[in-house]
Image (spheres, grey):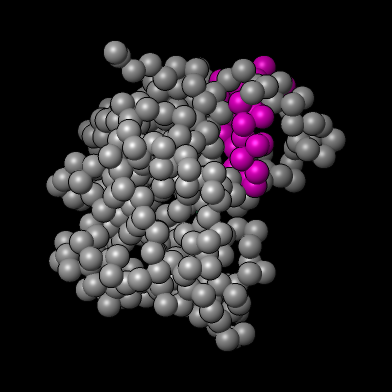
């Protein structure tokens, strides 16, 4: 049956079939090739979209804005300080108002329930630009990057996510791997493995039964063998900065180094990271924390800058995949 995603919200990959995810990836490959060939301009012509950001962003905001402009849409940006949402106006009323003005709504913030409520009450597609428990547009970009650099179908690819295995990126990866029949390993300390919500594990294991995905969690470096992709994320996500001391203690053995690359026994292994990344001391946060005695680097500069690292292709792919999501749902 032909895939039709018109009018659908994009809240989590769990809401989509493998065929629908395949469709968005194929569309993204196609839109990327077209942009390279100078062909773009009207797939979102006459559409208005609004971007709501309650957390900061570089890539996600720019990806939505550039993708929208490329295809002729108009963009309104609202951050948490510049709208009435939640303070003087309920989420439900805000959603109803925005649904009268806009063809699509992007939301980045804390609770997944907020993005769900916006979708429930606005009557237009809502796109999840990151919550505390998911980051689905990032996974589409990561899969596109994997397909560009690894000559195997996704269901033969092993991804090892190193570090904070209970954060939004780890959950999003588990959902994505489960849906696409991939091999996922969450490599992190037992304490954080124990912190993964049971509901998440139950959901991904149910999906995996149907797709043949393998979802594993391990604190033992042996799990790195045969990895095609090593993935990392910062150790304290937005809103968790007070947990840096404990995280550094727990996660230092899980920093991606040249030894981690070697432990995969795969000379072609690629390194991916959603970014932003602490890989040196060129940021105020990395410097300030180092002065306090905390080395917050989740990956070494050598690995980040190595030939294995495809992180800037991955960052570019945020734009092509977000464009695909918008074109598929409101185009
Ligand atoms: N990867 C990602 O979502 O980056 P931003 O926080 O800059 O949007
Ligand atoms: N886990 C990170 C992802 C940033 C893209 C955070 O939520 O801050």
Q: Position of residue 18 (x, y in %)?
A: 33, 30
Q: Position of residue 305 (x, y in %)?
A: 30, 69
Q: Is residue 180 magenta?
A: no
| Residue 64 falls left or right of residue 82 | left
Residue at 41%, 37% in the rendered image: 206
* Nearest the eye: 52 or 135: 135
* Nearest the eye: 187 or 234: 187
Q: Position of residue 88 (x, y in %)?
A: 85, 35
Q: Quadrant of the C terminus?
A: top left
**Residue 317 visible, this angle:** no
Looking at the image, residue 269 lies above or below residue 24: below
**Residue 129 visible, this angle:** yes
Quarter of the rendering containing residue 143: top left
Quarter of the rendering containing residue 63: top left
Looking at the image, residue 76 lies above or below residue 285: above
Residue at 26%, 53% in the rendered image: 158
Residue at 46%, 77% in the rendered image: 252
Q: Which residues are magenta?
A: 97-119
* Nearest the eye: 83 or 106: 106
* Nearest the eye: 198 or 282: 198
Looking at the image, residue 38 lies above or below residue 238: above
Quarter of the rendering containing residue 130: top right
């Amino acid at each position: 049956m032909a895939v039709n995603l018109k009018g659908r919200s994009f809240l989590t990959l769990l809401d989509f079939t493998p065929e629908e995810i395949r469709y968005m990836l194929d569309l993204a490959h196609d839109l990327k090739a077209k942009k390279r060939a100078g062909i773009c301009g009207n797939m979102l012509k006459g559409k208005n979209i609004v971007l709501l950001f309650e957390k900061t962003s570089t890539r996600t905001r720019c990806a939505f804005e550039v993708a929208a402009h490329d295809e002729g849409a108009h963009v309104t940006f609202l951050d948490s300080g510049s709208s009435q949402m939640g303070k003087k106006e309920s989420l439900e009323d805000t959603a109803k108002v925005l649904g009268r003005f806009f063809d699509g709504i992007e939301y980045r913030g804390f609770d997944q329930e907020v993005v769900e409520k916006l979708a429930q009450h606005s009557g237009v597609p809502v796109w999840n630009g990151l919550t505390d428990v998911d980051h689905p547009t990032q996974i589409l970009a990561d899969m596109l990057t994997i397909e560009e650099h690894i000559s195997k179908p996704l269901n033969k690819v092993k991804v090892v996510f190193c570090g904070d295995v209970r954060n939004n990126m780890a959950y999003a990866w588990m959902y994505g791997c489960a849906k696409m029949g991939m091999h996922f390993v969450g490599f992190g300390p037992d304490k954080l493995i124990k912190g993964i919500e049971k509901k998440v594990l139950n959901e991904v294991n149910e999906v995996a039964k149907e797709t043949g995905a393998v979802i594993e969690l391990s604190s033992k470096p042996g799990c790195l063998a045969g990895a095609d992709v090593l993935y990392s994320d910062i150790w304290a996500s937005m809103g968790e900065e007070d947990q840096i001391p404990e995280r550094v203690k727990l996660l230092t053995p899980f920093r991606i180094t040249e030894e981690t690359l070697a432990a995969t026994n795969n000379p072609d292994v690629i390194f991916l990271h959603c970014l932003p990344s602490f890989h040196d001391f060129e940021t105020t946060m990395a410097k300030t924390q180092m002065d306090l005695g905390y080395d917050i680097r989740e990956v070494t500069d050598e690995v980040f800058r190595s030939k294995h690292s495809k992180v800037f292709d991955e960052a570019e792919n945020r734009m092509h995949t977000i464009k695909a999501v918008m074109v598929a749902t409101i185009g």
